[in-house]
Amino acid sequence: KMAKEMENWPAAARRSGEELLERMQASPDWSSNGPFRRAIKVFDDALRLYKPSEIVLSFNGGKDATVLLHLARAAVAGFLKESGAESGPTCLRCVYFAESDGFDEMEDFIVAMESTYKLEIERFPGGFKDGCEHMIKNFAAKAFILGTRKSDPHGKFVESFSPSSAGWPSFMRVHPILSWEYDDVWRFLTEMSLEYCVLYDRGYTSIGRKDNTEKNPLLLQPDGSFLPAHMLKLQAMDPLLERHGRRQSGGNDCDSAQLCTAAIVTIGNEVLSAKVQDVNTNYAARVLRSCGVVLRRVAILPDKTEEIAKAVKEMAADCTAVITIGGIGPTHDDVTFRAVAEGLGKGLVHNVEMEGFLRQFKRRPSQEEAGVAGPNRADLKWDTQKMCLMPGDTELLMEHGKEFPLLRCGKVYMLPGVPQFMRQQIDHAGRLLKKSGCAFHCRQIRLSVEEALVAKAITATAEEFPNVEVGSYPYYNGSAHKTIVMLEGRCNTRVDLCQVFMTEQIPDSYIISADSDPTLPPS
């Protein structure tokens, strides 16, 4: 017998859920494969497998949890109506895993939802695992409704219904919005005219504690104000920018470091037509990673001004830095300067500093030593007009011992395409960006078994260490290692603890080796 019986759901709250369901069914997102319908189907399946009193909804007031709450209102109301019940249980029991140093506005919102929809919220001050044990022991819970999405750190390891991991109490994890994108969340909340925490209207897009949450800088306006969260438009390949205002915390200097992000635009018809092998992008990615810079996007584009300008504009809006590689020179297909100027909304201007540098450069005794080809070192005409015509406000950043300056215009670093010169420049850019980033720490665990045999252990590790990136890579090339698990994070101690936890979940006989190599072997 449960320690506390659930009260009947008031008629007004139930009717509100029915009305929401009707609005959802009238939406285009109720199509056969639409996100609204898929989510309700998961709820319907859960209500078919478990009694409402056996289901607990995890509700912390965040946007995903708020979506779950409103979906639950609609699903339970529809379930009761279809079953012909005159009265029914409250809109699922909720559990709130309360954290210290939370936002007052978030607590106010939770209290308001509790009152408005007559919720039964059990507040638990401990961690998720202990809270689940508490709900199972005291409320006979069998399933927990969670707001996990595929873009979350461990979202790719779970399904709509996933049993709890080894070492945890026995329960079913239910993920109704697993396939939803950020835009789906906000389309649901705004188009259905639903309540959500006011913090999301002030520039926050992902909310934790006060000490690890900031307004998302991607929503910052020129006047210093911030757009609301639903105005953030994410590229499909870069969903994690919704967490751009979150930082790790707790015992490591790198935890509070500002997240430094970058995008790379490699330019050249010769790359796209396979006339040359692109070694630049891989090298640049490795340098940026070693400097603690998170690489968000990579694009390889032809020598077309409008395409490059469009990419630069989009990437500069999303990232701390944009690296262009190639397209710098005196010939007709060297269009990078013009494209960057268009992308940043700047004009092309004659750069006097660049002219002075080139004149001095041509006086050097050897063309080969300088690393620049030209028809005549004494004649500046062939390259002056084009090489000195640069985006307005371009800086020439010289570094001791280097032949050529690094060119920077705002967020954009413009690098040459010749590999040996590009490497000098990206090393320089990496050192500059490293000042605002923090190095990553990596552990590589090589296993002798196939991925399926360790999937549960990998999932448990990702759940236990959400601030460590856990990746799994299968190998089918006949090598001794069948699976490699990579653990990567900004706190070395946390990564070490994550490795210990991971290896404790699997038999010792599975482990071939473990080291800190950040590069995977060829597959």
Image (cartoon, rainbow, N blue to C red):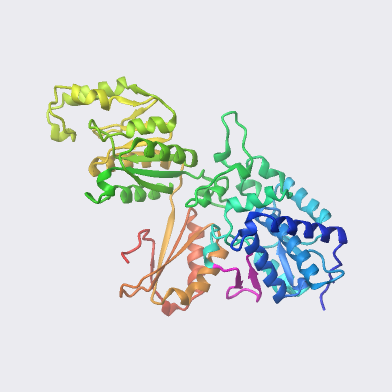
Residue 122 appears in which quarter of the rendering?
bottom right
Reply above or below: 4 against 201. below
Q: Position of residue 374 (x, y in %)?
A: 15, 30
x, y percent for residue 512? 37, 74
Q: Quadrant of the C terminus?
A: bottom left
Q: Is residue 92 visible?
A: no
- Which residue does the image show at 82% across and 72% down from the upper left? 84
Examine the structure image and report whether residue 450 is included in the region drawn in magenta.
Answer: no
Instruction: Describe residue 306's horizontal placement relative to residue 205 as left or right.
Output: left
Is residue 285 left or right of 42 when viewed as pictured?
left
The answer to whether residue 132 is left or right of residue 298 is right
Please identify the dominant SS of the magenta region. loop
Numbered-mark total? 0
Image quarter in which the N terminus is found: bottom right
The relative height of residue 82 versus residue 367 in the rendered view (above or below) is below
129 sits left or right of 417 in the view: right
Residue at x 66%, y 74% (from the top left corner): 171
Q: Which residues are magenta?
A: 158-176
In-front residue for pair 109/446: 109
| Quadrant of res 305 | top left
Residue 169 percent location from the top left of the image: 65, 75
Q: Residue 172 magenta-drawn? A: yes
Residue 180 vertical placement versus 54 (above, below):
above
The residue lying at 86 percent from left, 58 percent from top is 12
Q: Position of residue 432 (x, y in %)?
A: 39, 38
Question: Is residue 460 or residue 277 the one in the foreground?
Answer: 277
Residue 348 visible at all: yes
Nearest the eye: 457 or 501: 457
